Image: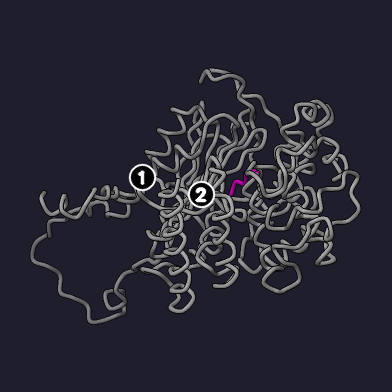
Amino acid sequence: MRVAAAFLAIFVGIALVAVGIVQTTGGLAGIDPAGSSRSPSGGPGYGAGPTTAPSPSRSGPSVGPDDSASPGGGPESPAPSSSPVVVPPGPTQTQQLDARLQATLDSARRKLAVPGVSVTILFPDGSRWTGVSGLANIATRTPVLPDTAFAFASMSKTFTSALIIQLVAEGRIHLGDSAAALLPTLSKPIDRRITVGMLLDHTSGLDDYFLNPKINKPLQANPTRAWTVSDALAFVRKPYFAPGRGWHYSNTNYLLLGLIAERVTGQPLAVSIRSRLLDPVGLGSTWYQAVERPRTALAHGYRLPGTKLTVRPIDVDDGSGIAPFRSVVTAAAGAGSIAGTSGDLAAWARQLYSGTVLGPQGTAVLLGGFSATAAYRPSVPYGYGVQALVIDGHPSFGHSGRLLGFRGVVRHFPVDGLTIAVLTNQNRADPAVIVRALLRVALPPVSPVPPCPACALSR
C-alpha cells in the first residue's frame, strides 16, 4: 500500500507540474487546453441493419492547396507534350489512424453487444476524432451521430465538484467546514462531524440511497414523476462508518453538495453550473436535465437483462426527453443529472484536468484529495470528485458513470496529452474496455519500468 501511495503522490505531482506549464505557456507538448473548437466529426453507425452517418474524420489543423497554384495565381503553364502518369494519393497517416480507430470501435461495440456508442479523442496537437457506432434508438433504427447526446450519469459529479472547489477558492466555503452547518434543514439531519471535504471524497460514511433496493420500485413505477431531495433522502439508511473512518462511494454525498452550492450561491444548481462552467468552457451540447431544455437529440437508454449477448435490449425511455427517465434523473440531482455529447465531455475533461477551469490553485485542490482516501484502498483511487488510474502504463484522471440504461467513462492522460470520452446507451458492458482498446491504437505501448538500473544496462 505504501508503494501505491508513493506512486500516486508522484503521479499527482507530475500532473500539477503539467498544470503549471499549461497555465504559463499555453500548452504541454502542443496540448490545446481547450481542445479543438471545431465541430466533431464521426464515423459510420452500425446497427442490426443498414444505417447511414458521416464518414470518420479528424477535425483540427488542415493544410489547403498552395494559393500560387490556383487559377489566376500565376502565369499559365504550357501544356505538356505527353500525358503525365497520374499516381493516386495514398491515405495519410492521420487517415490510417482514423480508420484503425473506427474499426476498433466497431469491433468493440459488436463484441460487447452495445446498442450505440459515441467516442471522442482529443489529441496533443488540439485535433479531435469522433467515432460513432450503432443505434441511438433501436425501434426507429436511428443511428448514433456525432451530435447525439447521452446521460453522463455519475460523470456529472465532476461538474458539482468543480463548482464546490470554485467556491472554496473564492473563500466562501472551506473543505473543513461542517456540511450540516451549510445545508438547509433536512428531513434526515446528518452528523455534524461530516465536512465538505468528506462529501467530495466519499469518506463521510453516508449511505447511498440509490443502493437501497427499496428505491427501485417507486422510481420505475412512475418514471415521469419529478423527485425531491426529501424523496431521495427517505431511502438513506444507517451510515457505513463514522465520518472520516473509511471510504464508500455514495451518491448521497453529491446530492448534499448540490444543496450546499445552492445555499452558498443563492442560485439553483443548474443555473450555477450553466453560468460558471458550461458557458465559460463552451459546452454548447451539454445541459442539466429536467431543468434545461435538451441542446441536441438524446439517445434512448437500454437495459440489458442477464449476461448473454443475445438478450433483447429493453428501452427505458419515458418519452419526456430526459435520459434515462425523469424520476431517476431528478432523484440524482447533483450526483448525476447532466447529459451531453462525447465531444463536450472530452473537452470538459481536457480543460478541467489541465487547469483551465479552476486555475493552478483550484486544480491543485482538485488533484490533492487522494491522500485522505489512499489508506482505505478504494476500488479506484479517488480524490475530490476525480479518479486516478494508470491504464497500460499511461496515468490518467477522470470519472466513470452508470445510470439505468447508460454507461460512460472519460479519461485525460496528462503526460501523453490525450483525452478519451466514451458514452454508451446500455447498462451492462464496461466502457473502460473501449477506452483501453482505443488507447492502444492512439498511443504506443509504454515499456515496463526495469526492476533496477543494472538490469536495464545488462540488456
The part of the image, by quadrant, that contains residue 401 is: top right
* Kind of residue sitting beneath label 1: Asp
- Point out which mark residue 421 bears: 2
> Residue 148 in magenta?
yes
Kindly identify which residue carries mark 1: 392
Residue 206 rendering spot, x and y as whole percentages: 74, 43
The residue at the point 15 percent across, 74 percent down is 78
Whichever of callouts 2 and 1 sits on the residue coming sooner in the sequence is 1
Mark 1 burial class by Cα count in 10 Å: few <14, some 14-19, many 20+: few
As measured in the structure, the alpha-carbon distance from the residue carrying label 2 to the one carrying label 1 is: 17 Å
Residue 176 rendering spot, x and y as whole percentages: 71, 62
Q: Which of 325 and 262 is in front in this view?
A: 262
Tell me if 162 is positioned left or right of 394 in this view.
Answer: right
Tell me if 77 is positioned left or right of 165 in this view.
Answer: left
Instruction: Please give the count of numbered marks on the rendered protein.
Output: 2
Residue 138 rendering spot, x and y as whole percentages: 61, 29
Under tag 2, what secondary structure? strand
- State whether residue 312 is above or below residue 21: above
Q: Which portion, as a residue range, is magenta?
A: 147-153
- State whether residue 242 is above or below residue 57: above
